Image (tube, grey):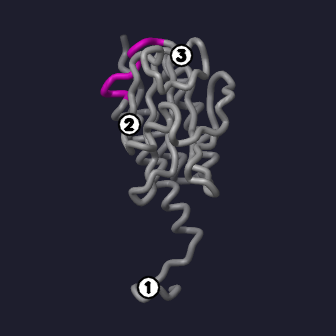
Amino acid sequence: MPKPPFCEIISELKRLAESATDFSSLQKFAVDVIAQNLPYYDWVGFYMLDPDDSSVLVLGPYHGAPTDHLRIPVTKGICGAAVATGETVVIDDVTTDPRYLACSLETRSEIVVPIRVNQKIAGEIDIDSHTVSAFGPDDRRFLEECATLFGRFIQETRDKLSPQADDNGLTI
């Protein structure tokens, strides 16, 4: 079996991140390029913390079957567990995990990776597969690198939009 094209996908994401003007366009590109190049990634999507209510994750761009889970409390599901622990969560068989919020009867495994901006969780990338134990250490490293890239993009975009302050808090 050929090695997944993780490096190529990261390179494409980095190239777009250099020219993208907003996170939404990077998200849309990311879900498509990841899903198209990794056929065992059956659902690829973003959940971001609601800026008005940090106790809720809001569905962002995704690639795959529609979901009824448009808003997820951070106290629920695998997505909530990733926010609560601040760590990547890998579930080899969702049918054995009581936290799993069923989106599709076909889903068998899931990986959720937090996206951090200045060490604070801003959201996550969520991947479902129709295959049990689909996600190994290489998938985890790949998705964590993606999450780091997304967090850096968000921070750099915020830095461009807001004035910088000197050590005394004065706008420069």
Relative to 28, is 39 on the left or the right? left
Residue corresponding to mark 2: 88
- Visible in this render: residue 21? no
Asked whether the residues under the numbered discs 2 and 3 touch, taking CB atoms below 8 Å apart as contact, a structural biologist would say no
The percent coordinates of residue 75 (x first, y second) are 51, 40
Q: Earlier in the sequence, mark 2 or mark 3?
A: 2
Residue corresponding to mark 1: 166
Q: Earlier in the sequence, mark 2 or mark 1?
A: 2
Query: How far separated are the C-alphas under marks 2 and 3?
Result: 18 Å
Q: Quadrant of the N terminus?
A: top left
Residue 74 marker = none
Label 3 crowd (10 A; few <14 / some 14-19 / many >=20): some
Which range of residues does the magenta coloring cover? Answer: 131-139
Q: Nearer the viewer, residue 85 or 107?
A: 85
Name which residue lies at 44% across and 51% down. Answer: 116
Name which residue lies at 44% across and 37% down. Answer: 81
Figure quadrant of residue 6: top left
The percent coordinates of residue 119 (x first, y second) are 39, 57
Three-letter amino acid code at disc 3? Thr
Which secondary structure lies at badge 1? loop
Foreground disc of the pair 2, 1:
2
